[in-house]
Amino acid sequence: MIALFFAGLWSRISSWLAPVGVALAIVAGAFFYGRSNGKADAKAEQAKANAKAIKQARGVEDDVQNMGGSDIDRALGKWLRDGR
């Protein structure tokens, strides 16, 4: 009697198990696809920011190379605390 009950219950559960599994697989696939796209976008944005920072630093280095000693002292004077 109990075995017959569990057999009937299992047949009802197993008929829903495949569609639920497919739905979960679709949701998981969409989640991981979106996550990988977000990671790639973040890496591209970081690379762009790094390139901009390198370009800016190179520009500052070039400006300093073109300055004379007194010009450098005057430009850096605003960062000193010795009262200049």
Image (cartoon, rainbow, N blue to C red):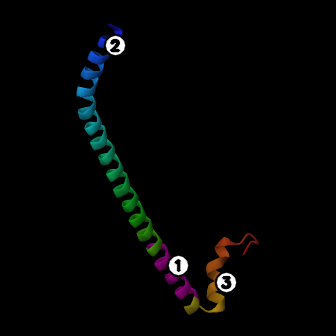
Q: Position of residue 21 (x, y in %)?
A: 29, 36
Judge left or right: residue 62 versus residue 18.
right
Q: Amino acid at mark 2?
A: Ala
Main secondary-structure element of the magenta-colored stretch: helix
Mark 1–mark 3 distance (CA, rounded to whole Å): 19 Å
Mark 2 or mark 1: whose residue is earlier in sequence:
2
- Where residue 43 sits in the image (x, y, percent)? 42, 64
For label 3, the crowd category at 10 Å Cα-Cα, with few meaning under 14, some 14 to 19 and many 20 or more, is few
Q: Position of residue 71 (x, y in %)?
A: 61, 87
Which residue lies under the disc numbered 2?
3
Report the amino acid beneath label 1.
Ala
Residue 18, quarter of the rendered image: top left
* Magenta range: 52-64
Q: Specify whether 46 is left or right of 4.
A: right
Q: Could you tell me which secondary element the residue under label 3 belongs to?
A: helix
Disc 3 residue type (three-letter): Asp
Q: Could you say which disc has been placed on residue 57 in the image?
A: 1
Give the Cα distance between marks 2 and 1.
77 Å
Determine crowd level at label 1: few under 14, some 14-19, many 20+ residues with C-alpha closer than 10 A.
Answer: few
| Residue to which mark 3 is pinned | 73
Disc 1 secondary structure class: helix
* 11 or 40, nearer to the observer: 11
**Image check: 32 left or right of 51?**
left
Quadrant of the image containing the C terminus: bottom right
* Mark with earlier residue (3, 2): 2
Mark 2: give few (<14), some (14-19) or many (20+) Cα within 10 Å.
few
Residue drawn 32% across and 7% down? Answer: 1
